[in-house]
Image: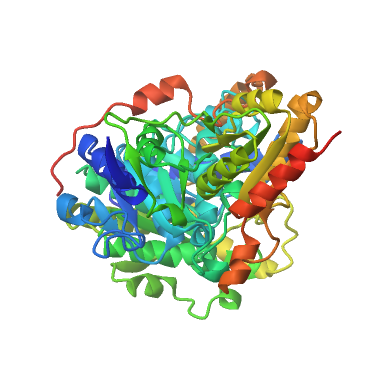
Amino acid sequence: MRPLVSRAHALDLLRAMVRISRFEEKCAELYSATEIRGFLHLYIGEEAVAVGVMNALTPEDAIVATYREHGHALARGIDMGRVMAEMLGRQEGVSRGRGGSMHLFDAATRFYGGNAIVGGGLPLAVGLALADKMLGRDRVTCCIFGEGAVAEGEFHESMNLAALWKLPVLFVCENNLYAMGTALDRSESQIDIHAKAANYGMPSEAIDGMDVLETEAAAQRAVAQIRVAPGPVFLEFRTYRFRAHSMFDAELYRDKAEVEHWKERGPVKTLVERLEAAELGNHDDLGAIETQVDAEIDAAVAFARAGTLEPIGDLTRFVYAEEAQNARLAVIPRVEPSA
Amino acid sequence: MTTITYREAMRQAIRAALQRDPRVFLMGEDVGRYGGSFAVSKGLLAEFGEERIRDTPLSESAFVGAGIGAALGGMRPIVEIMTVNFSLLALDQIVNNAATLCHMSGGQFNVPVVIRMATGGGRQLAAQHSHSLEGWYAHVPGLRVVAPATIEDAFGMLPSALEKPDPVLIFEHALLYNMKGELPDGAGPTDLDRAVIRRPGRDLTLLTYGGSLFKSLEAAATLANDGIEAEVIDLRTLRPLDDETIMGSVSRTRRVLIVDEGWKSGSISAEISARIMEQAFYDLDAPVARLCSAEVPIPYAAHLERAAIPQVENIVSYARQLVARNV
């Protein structure tokens, strides 16, 4: 087990995870109150992956995430109010209300979605990394997907291309054991996912995804490796989704006992226990963080509710680029010599 | 004025784009060492190197998606797919990603990618290499769909496409690559929003594009011998459709034959016909007529393939019936 290095850092990690879990609980509540509609996929149980991985990235790096991406967006530093406004379909939302829960986008933090076709984000990440390599930019593209994506052809095509072209991609597989309701061992002949990636000739590791100190350290190692020796690295985080797949899921496919077993290893619980064992903190710290976070969430909800609805006259905007976007794109960048 | 092939015109356009803008690169199956499955990129590898003339594995979804990702990342990729039939392996990337990202992100991200592919039949390549599915792509908001049918457009559409901040699909009819023609000195970018009248006429309008253009022009020449003056419109762009040019011609000739190598059912010809009903119904002296491919997967045997695809004599015959028809 990795030693706790400092109280301050541990509390930062704890806060980041609590922000996600409390935000998700609020989303579930607003869904029940019909303020949020459409599909809503909650991330509770997997917080350690998003927090650990995002901590390893710089602002110049890019992220391509999944449709279960609220946690990634918050950990990346996207404003909680604008994320919540997106959930409520307001034009103050990160995607102006055009994306919703599954399609959070943010150019400022290089957050390229919110992608809801399983496996569909992987080729995009390969391309973003290709652009960085060709333009001589020292950046990493972090591509997040679930273990369900591993069954898609796009997964294998993208693994091959990234390894073949030695592209700076951090592949982050969130293995929560269920692709919607289909268990990994019911859908894959080889359930050791990181072994699949290794076959493509890239460094690959399986990590305890419930321990944020482990996820952070693994992501830092991987990113450091990509920066010194360009080429993809694959991390399989073994984690678990505590809540249903979406709000329509009756969870017929797994035992309550299994869920309870994993909850015993919940990332927030695990970190608090580590703090206590090291005598660096306790439940009071968690309570204080929860109080602060709840205030932030209340403010985010208030911001979202106060948001405005885009006029229907603007419905067809952004199907094609507008003039300002066009002008921005016309600038030819300076190409750095390839590394 | 120089005489070159359609293939050479396309190659010159790619070459000029690579010279002009360091963000431009070409990627696809066999575009490098092989020289392109239709030899469009022959010689470019030696001039520009492996980084910019990039051979890919047989992974249409990954390399088309990588083109979209590279476009998001600031590059101006030209992605070549061997044929439109193979593009179906990349349909997810084109329809779910390229076409949606600008809108879904509230205008934060653009996908300035150009995807070129061969289309059409006539070479006895049977049902998995011969179809004309460009009309499908024209169904999708967020995409631009163009079909160069002349030497000048083969040269001029690519630079225009690269200037667009949105994804542009270029459909090159495979029978056109060997076609020779004049490239005027100083030929430049083509307007991607406009159809063009290739031959003016007063008696009927032949609305067509791509590989059916030269057939329609030949048919018009035959018809002229009988005193029937057909106006031939090259649509050039299937999305957006240039309604103004289409309706302008309809209002002059009052009779329309749409010639399209795609199938009839649920097609671009159906869309054009519907628009004419909506916008120019009272200008018509006869119902809109369509000559399309037979509703079969394109067969191998030469006589069957020929029978399946619109030919000059069919155009002539349909046109005569249309003009003879009194309403």
Give how far across and how far down residue A91 sits, in percent. 59, 24
Give how far across and how far down residue A257 sits, in percent. 66, 69
Quarter of the image where the N terminus of chain A is located: bottom left
Give how far across and how far down residue B181 sits, in percent. 36, 43
Q: Residue at x 65, y 35 (%)?
A: B227
Q: Quick one: A261 or B33, which is closer to the camera?
A: B33
From where the camera sits, is residue A239 visible? Answer: no
Give how far across and how far down residue B143 sits, in percent. 53, 39
B227 left or right of A76 in image: right
Q: Quick one: B61 or A265, which is closer to the camera?
A: B61
From where the camera sits, is residue A325 visible? Answer: yes
Q: Residue at x 70, y 69 (%)?
A: A253
Q: How is the image coloured?
A: rainbow
B220 left or right of A218 in image: right
The vertical placement of B84 against B222, above or below, is: below
The vertical placement of A184 against B316, above or below, is: below
Q: Quadrant of residue A98?
A: top right
B145 left or right of A246 in image: left
Q: Residue at x 37, y 35 (%)?
A: B156
